[in-house]
Image (cartoon, rainbow, N blue to C red):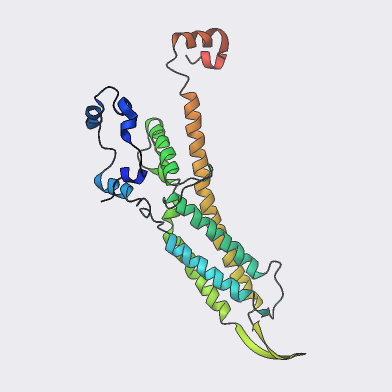
Amino acid sequence: MASIFSRLNYNFDSTKFGTALDPTGDIAAKLNKSAPLMTKWQYDALANSDISGYFQNPVANVSNSMFNTVNSFITISTSVNYNVATLAIPIDKHISNLKNSIVSFTQHTNRLSGVAISDDPTKPDFNSALGVGEIVLMITNKYDGIQNNVPILGNFTSIFIKDELEAELAQLLSDYNKFNTTINIIQLEGEGGPYNSTTSNISQSVLNNIVSNVISSMTFIDNQIQLDLNFYAQSKSIVDDYSKISQMSNFSPLKLYFINNYTGTEKLKSKL
């Protein structure tokens, strides 16, 4: 049976530690009085190094479907010759930009749902967003009368938009199928003999409409990510400011003397 201690791979003669094993002769009694740090299932998980797979991204399926669809879209949009005027920015570039937005969104929601840990202090993950949000909730509850979890949930809006993402996916699939039906493979004569050419007879208006939808989808996703990042940044700013302003009370006699006679501004002294 696996144990946490066995993970240490301890291999030494413990008698060499001598009295360092229990200098006061009461270590066992003291340890027995301490409360367990984990539940039984957590102990078993730690003993077996089974520490992953406990969180999931609730919008992963739809964002992955969007990613796969844009990949397919890029493949066909870059392989055809068009019979319409060239766009200022080719359609495949717009779709590639959407792909990048979807990748960023998946990474963002993976962090918010606990699937991944953030290594950037400006990008919240499950624990940092909860931690900051809970402090802001306590502050706004006492002084602004907030009695719900909005100060916390404002960091997590991107994992609550599954319906909107599915609508974006449906539009993307519709545009992909619409584009795909315009593609034809024709045989042309060349210097080396006949060759196949992939062409599209899509109209300019339909192409423009597809590009407009792609840009709209990209903008929606980018804005959603930024909404969370902005809320988190503001939350952190509030917590930082609270940490500073909360020091302006419960002064020791010496600190109060310094403030009144040396270091305090009139702005501070007028509030004491």
Where does residue 97 sit, x and y in percent of width and height? 61, 62
Which residue is pictured at 49% across the width and 42% down the height? 232
Is 71 placed above or below 257 here?
below
Which residue is pictured at 65% across the width and 83% down the height? 199
Front residue (pair 171, 22): 22
Which residue is pictured at 60% across the width and 83% down the height? 183
Where does residue 14 sit, x and y in percent of width and height? 32, 34
Please tell me in which quadrant of the rendered image residue 16 appears: top left
Q: How many marks?
A: 0
Where does residue 164 sit, x and y in percent of width and height? 45, 61
Where does residue 117 sit, x and y in percent of width and height? 46, 48
Is 64 placed above or below 125 here?
below
Front residue (pair 118, 64): 118
Image-based side of 32 in relation to 148, left or right: left
Front residue (pair 209, 3): 3
Front residue (pair 231, 258): 258
Which residue extends farthest right?
191
Image-based side of 190 in relation to 207, left or right: right
Is 223 placed above or below 23 here?
below
Please tell me in which quadrant of the rendered image residue 146 appears: top left
Is 14 placed above or below 251 here?
below
